[in-house]
Amino acid sequence: VAVKPHEMFLWVDPKNGNRALLFLSTPALETDPATPNLVVIDISQVPKGGAVTEVAEGNWNNRFPGTDQANYPFDAASPDGCGPYDCNLFVHSMGVKPDGSRTYLALEAGHFLVLDTSDLANNTIPPGTVLSLNDKLLTDPTNRPVWLQDPLDPAAVPGVFPGGCARQGPGPSSKDCPNSHSAVQVLGRRLALSTDEVYGTFTFDNQGCRWGWARLIDVADPAHPSITGEFLLDQNQLSFCGSAGDTAVSEQFRSFSTHNPTVFRDLALIDWHSNGFQAIDISDPAHPSQGGFFRPTPIPVVANEDPGLSQGPATTVDQLLHPDVNDPDFKTKIVMWSYPIIKDGLIYVIDVRNGLFILRYTGPHADEVNEIEFLEGNSNLGDAVDLDEQD
């Protein structure tokens, strides 16, 4: 089956440094178990000129309430043509526990699931076979943590329009929708961190304020994971929508949403798109708080703007070449993007518009960062295995 990979997690076997698996999300709306939402490939032989081998795949859409209805995924009677889950039920990304035993799935309208990948970690798959992960869920979707869904019940079928989203107020539509982006292990604790991503209306009419934020999820009982706390910035509050800061440009061409995180025991480092880079103190998972932040000053002129995240406010050639750097919409031309990488105590972050930044963190729990030789959010390389052994 032809699939299109989206996000990746590199897992190197802690017991065999010559064995490496690449987890790939392959977003698909289909409920057919033969159309994967996640593919795992063995890349161990690539350095020697060998082949890439698929070793596992899975699709869990058919486990979600309502996906057996005739109007899933499309409903011609709805204004946007989508049925339950608003054409948004698929695996967007995944984070693998450093020992490989569990994988945390971020499904956009499907929130968060825990998957048993111990067979992959233990290398018990017979050579030449592809392991089906379809029956390996530790979290049944009817017991998943849910947010911004209407009704707020994991066993219920979301409303057809507006996508089963929680309502912001009166009117026929809502933009307060779940858009789970990343899910990663909190190293050394029985917690995971999930981020939501929302783009502006340039991408879809139902996008825009309010913007996605971060949640901490208790995974001590993977059959019943639960949200322990949330962290929002000012732009993630409902009160921001319609305020002076919620400009026509920002509503279309910005995103004040979370994106990719790298997480320690007591600290989460999150690229937050137009809100720059954020360091969140998660030592108290019920009350996460801001530990530090960095917002770069945008470069006045770049060769290419990201069409969905940094267009505007220029409307003429002269304005494009000589922008008003004091314009509030110019100051938000920030596109913090990738998983932060820590090398020898320094933090490396990418703004896809404004470049590479190397930061030193001095806020709460800075000792956790200073002691790192290497760590990143989408692999178990470097210190990840040792840090997680504290659990």
Image (spheres, grey):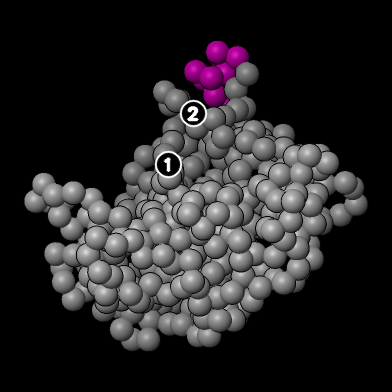
**What's under tag 2, amino acid-wise?**
Glu
Q: Residue furthest left?
A: 48
- Where residue 276 appears, as percent x and y from the top left, is 49, 50
Residue named by callout 1: 2
Q: Secondary structure at mark 2?
A: loop
Q: Residue at x 56, y 40 (%)?
A: 332
Q: Which of the 4 image quadrants contains residue 154? A: bottom right
| 64 over 310 or under it: above or below | below
Q: Residue at x 64, y 40 (%)?
A: 200
Give me the disc on residue 76. none
Q: Are marks 2 and 1 in contact (CB under 8 Å)?
A: no
Q: Residue at x 72, y 61 (%)?
A: 66
How many other residues sit within 10 Å of disc 2, few (<14), some (14-19) or many (≥20)?
A: some
Q: Which residues are magenta?
A: 316-326
- Between residues 161 and 211, which one lies in front from this camera angle? 161
Residue named by callout 2: 305
Q: How many labels, in total?
A: 2
